[in-house]
Amino acid sequence: SSYLGMGCDWGRMYAWSVHQNVAYGSGRECGVHMVDVSDPSDPHFLNTYSDPSMEDLRYEHSEVHRSKLYLSRHQQGVEVLDISQAGAITQIAVIPAENAWSSLAFDDYLYIADGAAGIKIVSLENTLEPIVIASLATSGTAKDLSLSGSYLFVAVGAAGVDMIDVSNPQAPLFRDNYNTTGYASRVSANESRVAVSDWDDV
């Protein structure tokens, strides 16, 4: 089965997250699409969402953590939404950013890939008032994030992949960089491997 993002340029959806059988798809200017995936062979469109206070939406990436949806919106920051009620969305906060491409939530922290500004680390102890507790420059434009143990791997475009020690989230430390042959736009890591979407190859 498949789902076409109606109203989006060329039907493009840029990232998906799932919570309680509802998939949330980021479609840049066409907002966030909510799709019932309780039967994966027959997905059903439920509704769309977009921040009513913004004309320039730019929804790039979605991340679900503890019944909250974190939406990366480039220069509009990261929007925090309560999705505890299936199919319903309530905005509870917006985290400022220079160019938020993606985010990754783990425990009480949200890591933001903030483009040329590097990474931001946000405390989620109070999701109504998330606080940026640290930031760190990266070797290139921060696009995507993956966490393995205490190491955060950051896809940094033409500069490849950075490895950052976040064992103390309030004081992240740059550890190393591997410059890939292409343009690192997505990254996924485990305890022994790092896979990189490098534009023309992996």
Image (tube, grey):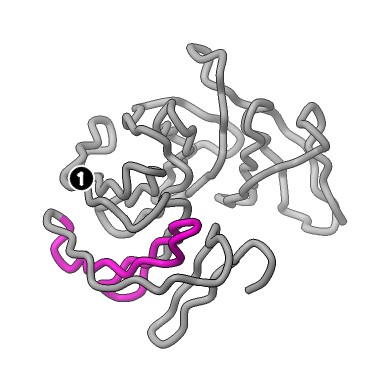
When the figure is inspected, residue 35 is found, relative to residue 179, above or below; the finding is above
SS under mark 1: loop
Q: Quadrant of residue 75?
A: top left
Residue 181: image location, x then y, percent: 56, 71
Task: Tell me, yes or no, whether the highlighted magenta stretch contains residue 166.
Answer: yes
Residue drawn 22% across and 65% down?
174
- Magenta stretch in the rendered image: 147-169
Q: Identify the residue position indicated by label 1 in the image.
A: 125
Q: Quadrant of the C terminus?
A: bottom right
Residue 44: image location, x then y, percent: 80, 42
Residue 18: image location, x then y, percent: 59, 52
Residue drawn 13% across and 54% down?
170
Task: Tell me, yes or no, whether the highlighted magenta stretch contains residue 187.
Answer: no
Q: Quadrant of residue 41?
A: bottom right
Looking at the picture, tell me which residue is in the foreground, 165 or 21: 165
Residue type of the residue flagged with mark 1: Glu
Q: Quadrant of residue 153?
A: bottom left
Residue drawn 67% across and 37% down?
34
Q: Quadrant of the N terminus?
A: bottom right
